[in-house]
Amino acid sequence: MIVVENLHKHFGGFHAVDGASLEIRQGSVTGLIGPNGAGKTTLFNVVAGRLAPTSGRVLMDGEDITGLPPHALFHKGLLRTFQIAHEFSSMTVRENLMMVPAGQLGETLWNTWFRRGAIAAEERALAQKADEVLEFLTISHLADERAGNLSGGQKKLLELGRTMMVDAKVVFLDEVGAGVNRTLLNTIGDAIERLNRERGYTFCVIEHDMDFISRICDPVICMAEGKVLAQGTVEEIKNDERVIEAYLGT
Ligand code: ADP
């Protein structure tokens, strides 16, 4: 579904991504691992249109999408999750979800609020959709909570929920596990698995927690020093000499 071909991203003389090639199969939950500084986030940012590559190509279903801006990728169903921006933290969880369809189309916050007042039917439909999303994620009880009051794991669920407000096909998910307790991590894992199985989402997940990776990811791609070092099942990756060496070297 997504093919990254010989991607390079240089910052000055530094090669953060240094000729990485990889494939994300349709219907997979692909894990992206590797020591800190391996270039995972930079690769995500290039694929998701946040950074222009120095060279190389990104294809989606065979179409060259290299360098397309995030809103154009959004229309194609390629989404990258983001931390809830500061200006949305005082809004409720439900309102945060309702903002997505308009907000991602490049409209301003104020414009969206104006439209909210003007088009009540649309607002009701959005609210209903938001409530369905919250139910799916088992966080209906948080609908009226301010986003800023959520725990780290609950915020991750909200980020995932934002992708469900639109027709996402492939979702790039950054560091799900960082600072999230086990129970919530399981809830997030369940949500990813169900979105994958029941709604046909393809995922690419950057994650450090190997238990989490073992549970939800197949295949796993390991990057180091800007390159793809190895790819395979979790077991294959765990026992791969090159992978072990890359982690020991940091
Ligand atoms: P990872 O996500 O695997 O930890 P990153 O993609 O965040 O790795 O970073 C790869 C390398 O690129 C790091 O050494 C980082 O310091 C460097 N880097 C990332 N972004 C920039 C930037 N905007 N300017 C300069 N160096 C950067």
Image: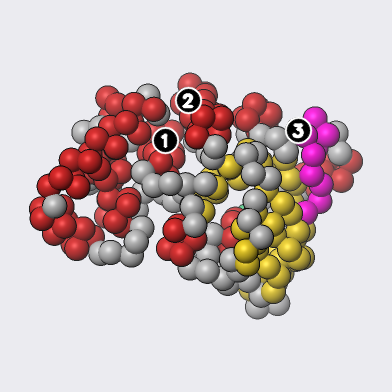
Residue located 89% across and 41% down the image: 241
Q: Is mark 3 within 8 Å of ligand 1?
A: no
Q: Residues within 10 Å of mark 3 (few under 14, many from 20)?
A: many
The magenta-colored residue range is 228-237
Give me the C-alpha separation between circle 3 and circle 1.
Answer: 24 Å
Visible in this render: residue 205?
Answer: no
Residue under label 1, please give it.
Answer: 157
Residue located 44% across and 58% down the image: 75
Magenta residue check for 188:
no
Q: Name the N-terminal-most of marks 3 and 2.
A: 2
Apparent side of residue 69 relative to residue 233 in the rendered image (left or right): left
**Residue 112, picture quadrant:** bottom left
Nearest the viewer among 90 and 133 is: 133
Q: Position of residue 147 (x, y in %)?
A: 29, 41
| Number of dots carrying numbers | 3
Secondary structure of the residue carrying tag 2 is helix
**Residue 108, picture quadrant:** bottom left
Magenta residue check for 235:
yes
Amino acid at the residue labelled 3: Val
Q: Residues within 10 Å of mark 1 (few under 14, many from 20)?
A: many
Residue 127 drawn above or below residue 138: below
Amino acid at the residue labelled 1: Leu
Residue 114 drawn above or below residue 167: below
Residue under label 3, please give it.
Answer: 234
Q: Position of residue 107 (x, y in %)?
A: 28, 64
Amino acid at the residue labelled 2: Thr
Q: Are the residues tagged 2 and 1 within 8 Å (C-beta)?
A: yes
Residue located 10% across and 53% down the image: 117
Q: Residues within 10 Å of mark 2 (few under 14, many from 20)?
A: some
Q: Are the residues tagged 3 and 1 within 8 Å (C-beta)?
A: no
Q: Position of residue 127 (x, y in %)?
A: 22, 39
